[in-house]
Image: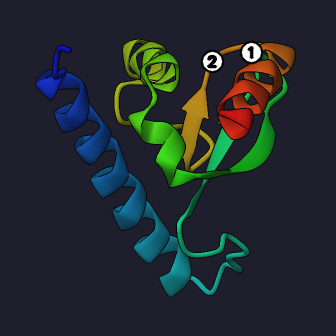
Amino acid sequence: MAIHIPRIIHVKQILQRSSSLKANQAASSAPFDVPKGYLAVYVGESERKRFVIPISYLNQPSFQDLLSQAEEEFGFEHPMGGLTIPCREDIFINLTSQLGGS
C-alpha cells in the first residue's frame, strides 16, 4: 500500500485556496448552499455545471486524478471562483456514482 504524500499536499492547497475564495465571496454577501462536509465543484469542458460533493471523495485515487487534471489546466486560478474540473459531465457523474456506492 503506497501513500501519495504529494497528492495530499495538492488537495490541501486546493482546499486552502477554495476556503479563501469562500471567505472573499462571503464578504460580498454571496449565498452559500453548500452543507458542512461538502464541496462545490464546477464540471465540464465548455459549459460548466455546479455539483456539490462530499469532501470524502477527495481521498479517492480516481478523484485525485481529476484534481491533478484540474491543477494542470487551471493551476490554482479557477475561472468560476470555485474548483473547476475539466472533464465531461457524464464521466464525472459516472465516477461520483461509483464513489457514492462504495
Name the spot of residue 88 as percent of width and height, x first: 78, 13
In percent of width and height, residue 64 lies at 42, 24
**Which structural element holds mark 1?**
loop
User: Which residue occupies the foreground of this view, 71 or 30?
Assistant: 71
Crowd class of label 1 (few under 14; some 14 to 19; many from 20; radius 10 Å): few
| Rendering quarter of residue 10 | top left
Q: Position of residue 63 (x, y in %)?
A: 51, 25
**7 lies above or below 100:** above
Query: Which residue in the structure is indicated by mark 2?
Result: 86
Identify the residue shown where x is 67% and y is 70%: 34
Q: Residues within 10 Å of mark 2 (few under 14, many from 20)?
A: many
Task: Classify mark 2: helix, strand or loop.
Answer: loop
Name which of mark 1 and mark 2 comes first in the sequence.
1
Q: Looking at the rendered structure, which numbered label has been put on residue 45?
A: 1
Circle 1/circle 2 CB separation < 8 Å: yes
Amino acid at pointer 1: Glu
**Position in image of residue 69 (x %, y %):** 46, 13
Say which of 32 and 90 sits in front: 90
Residue at the image point whose x is 31% and y is 38% from the top: 11
**Left/right of residue 63 with respect to residue 51 in the rendered view:** left
Residue beneath the point at 55% across and 75% down: 36
Mark 1 → mark 2, Cα distance in angstroms: 5 Å
Report the side of 24 relative to 42 (left or right): left
